[in-house]
Each structure stands twice: as structure tokens, then as C-alpha cells.
């Protein structure tokens, strides 16, 4: 397939949508990002990578990091995490508190903030440095040792992180955190602050398209666990828009409020699109439209 030609066509198609929506403002350091940026990259399972637009401009990965920390927890600690976090869509916004009390401090899934905090807590217990473990996975799989935290973004989120703190303390009251809340929040904010571009993120997500195999051919995840991460991305990766995303795009996908989305075509390729203006549910407007057009043009969907 001529990925570059496909990506050019996708970029031209979504151009009128770029800039529609709102850049995330609740993390002040993200509010100054250019709303008119757009980039998209495809990494095929053999390591070939193609891109157009602003595909080499770094952005804040935010919740996309949740798929990577989950993969690490499954790799290092196996299935036990599923006793502390569910696999069902929440139907609620990513930062919602409302289900946690009814459901005894067990978050619906690992991609809403509450679930990701539990995953980060587990990764902290397993590795002693959850933020560094996630960063190292990103560096190793992208092949870019310069991938880094943006500590200004992490601090900015920490200064405005009352809601995540509320989620974490509430779960701690149910005994669903092993580490102290400030430690969990610190590692969670750092993991979310990782800066990467579309090229590096598409490459970094390659193990999800290779059924768990890393870029160097060694195994990160058993095939079954790679299937689980992809399945939860399909059903929960875009929060209360996951049904619409599955209907339009037909791929597992994980979004972030930095405006990035990583989508996986198992056995074929990983796609990363970035455009910072978001819809009201926190997903990139142009990004979702681009993935919709990509799968419609190419037929590369799981359906
Ligand atoms: O915890 C937060 O609110 C952010 N660090 C991440 C949220 C996010 O990216 C949701 N994605 N669409």
C-alpha cells in the first residue's frame, strides 16, 4: 500500500476540520498549543514509517500513555490487575467520579483516569518508578532516546489536579491503592506529560499491531494480553465516545487531551494522528475524522 499517498489524501480531506473544537485548557500548559496543527503517521509491522503534515512535531501524549502503562503492568505483573480495575466502558467522562462509590472503589476500566491511577499504582509497586518505566518503553519502542517528560506540563497538571487527587484519595479509602496518593499522582502526571511526535508514537505502539512483539523481536506481552489491551482500547479508549469511535473508525484507539490518538490495525500497522482541538468528550475532532477517512479509504479496519 502507498501509505504516503493515502495519508496525503486523508490530510486534504480533514483540512476543513482542523482547528474545530477546543484545545484542552484545564491543564494550563496545554492551552497555548497551536489549534491548527495536524499530523499523521503510519508505522507498519516491519518498522516502515510514513507521515504527512506536522508528524514530526512533539506534543503531550496525555492519556495515550495509559495504554503503555497498562501493557507494562500486564507484562510485569500479569492478570492480577483485573481484580482491581474492570474491562467495561464507563459511559461517563474520563475524569468522572460518579461510578466509583457505587462500585466500591473499582474503576470501570484502565483508561478512565481512576483506572489509570490504579494501573500507575501497580506499576509503581512492580518497578519502583512507574513514570520512568513508561518513558523507557516509549524510548525503546520508538527508537528515540530523546523522548522526555515535559516537567512544566506535569507541574501545571499537578497544580490543577484536584479532581485526580479526589479520585485517588477516594480509591485509597477503599484500599485500592498500595502506594501513597502523592506518589501515585506524581508518577501519573509525569507519564501523561511525555512529549512525542506522531512518528515516534506510531512506532512505539507497534507491539500492539505485532500481537505483543517488541521492535527488537522479543516479546513484551503474550498474545492473549496484547489482545486484551487492543480490546479495551476499542471499547474504552475514547471514553464516552467509544461507541461512536468504533462505529466510525472500526479500530482499537487511545486518545489523549493533547490531541493525539493512536489506533491499531492488528497484524498490519499502527497509526498516530495529532490535532489539538478537541470535541466535548476530549477527543481530537480532526483526528477522529482522519482515522474514519483512513479506514474507509484503505479498508484497514478490524471489521
Ligand atoms: O488526567 C488527566 O486529566 C490528563 N492527564 C489526561 C486526560 C486525557 O488525556 C483524557 N483523554 N482524552
Image (cartoon, helix red, strand yellow):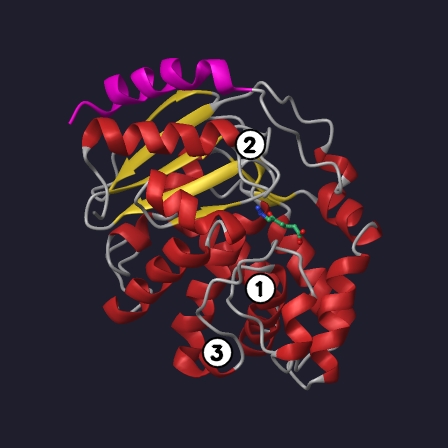
- Label 1 vs label 2: CA separation? 23 Å
Q: Is residue 27 left or right of residue 130?
A: right
Picture layout, residue 82 above or below residue 87:
below
Q: Nearer the viewer, mark 3 or mark 2?
A: 3
Q: Disc 1 and disc 3: Cα gap in Å?
A: 11 Å
Task: Tell me which segment is drawn in magenta.
Answer: 1-18
For disc 1, the marked residue is 116
The tag on residue 4 is: none
Question: Percent x, y for residue 116?
Answer: 58, 64
Residue 187 counted in the magenta span: no
Q: Is residue 143 visible?
A: no
Please report the residue visible at 34 percent of the width from the left and 58 percent of the height from the top: 230
Of 291 and 130, nearer the camera is 291
Q: Is residue 279 left or right of residue 98?
A: left
Dominant secondary structure of the magenta stretch?
A: helix
> Label 3 belongs to which residue?
81
Which residue occupies the foreground of this view, 59 or 217?
A: 59
Q: Secondary structure at mark 2?
A: loop
Amino acid at each position: 500500500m502507498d501509505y504516503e499517498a493515502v495519508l496525503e489524501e486523508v490530510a486534504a480531506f480533514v483540512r476543513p476540520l482542523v482547528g474545530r473544537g477546543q484545545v484542552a485548557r484545564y491543564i494550563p500548559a496545554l492551552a497555548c498549543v497551536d489549534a491548527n496543527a495536524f499530523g499523521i503517521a503510519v508505522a507498519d509491522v516491519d518498522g516502515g514509517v510514513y507521515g504527512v503534515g506536522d508528524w514530526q512535531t512533539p506534543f503531550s501524549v496525555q492519556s495515550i500513555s495509559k495504554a503503555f502503562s497498562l501493557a507494562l503492568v500486564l507484562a510485569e505483573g500479569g492478570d492480577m490487575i483485573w481484580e482491581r480495575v474492570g474491562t467495561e466502558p464507563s459511559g461517563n467522562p474520563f475524569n468522572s467520579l460518579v461510578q466509583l462509590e457505587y462500585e466500591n472503589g473499582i474503576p470501570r476500566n484502565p483508561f478512565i483516569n481512576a483506572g489509570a491511577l490504579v494501573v500507575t499504582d501497580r506499576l509503581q509497586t512492580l518497578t519502583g518508578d512507574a513514570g520512568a518505566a513508561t518513558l523507557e518503553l516509549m524510548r525503546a519502542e520508538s527508537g528515540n532516546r530523546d523522548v522526555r517528560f515535559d516537567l512544566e506540563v506535569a507541574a501545571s497538571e499537578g497544580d490543577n489536579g484536584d479532581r485526580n487527587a479526589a479520585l485517588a484519595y477516594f480509591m485509597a479509602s477503599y484500599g485500592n491503592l498500595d502506594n501513597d496518593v502523592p506518589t501515585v499522582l506524581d508518577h501519573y502526571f509525569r507519564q501523561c506529560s511525555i512529549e512525542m511526535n506522531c512518528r515516534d508514537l506510531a512506532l512505539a505502539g507497534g507491539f500492539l499491531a505485532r500481537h505483543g512483539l517488541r521492535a527488537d523481536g522479543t516479546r513484551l506481552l503474550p498474545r492473549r494480553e496484547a489482545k486484551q489491551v487492543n480490546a479495551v482500547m476499542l471499547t474504552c479508549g475514547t471514553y464516552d465516545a467509544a461507541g461512536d469511535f468504533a462505529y466510525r473508525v472500526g479500530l482499537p484507539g487511545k486518545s489523549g487531551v493533547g490531541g493525539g490518538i493512536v489506533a491499531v490495525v492488528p497484524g498490519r500497522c499502527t497509526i498516530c494522528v495529532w490535532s489539538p482541538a478537541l470535541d466535548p468528550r476530549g477527543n481530537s475532532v480532526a483526528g477522529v475524522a482522519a482515522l474514519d477517512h483512513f479506514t474507509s479509504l484503505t479498508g484497514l479496519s478490524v471489521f
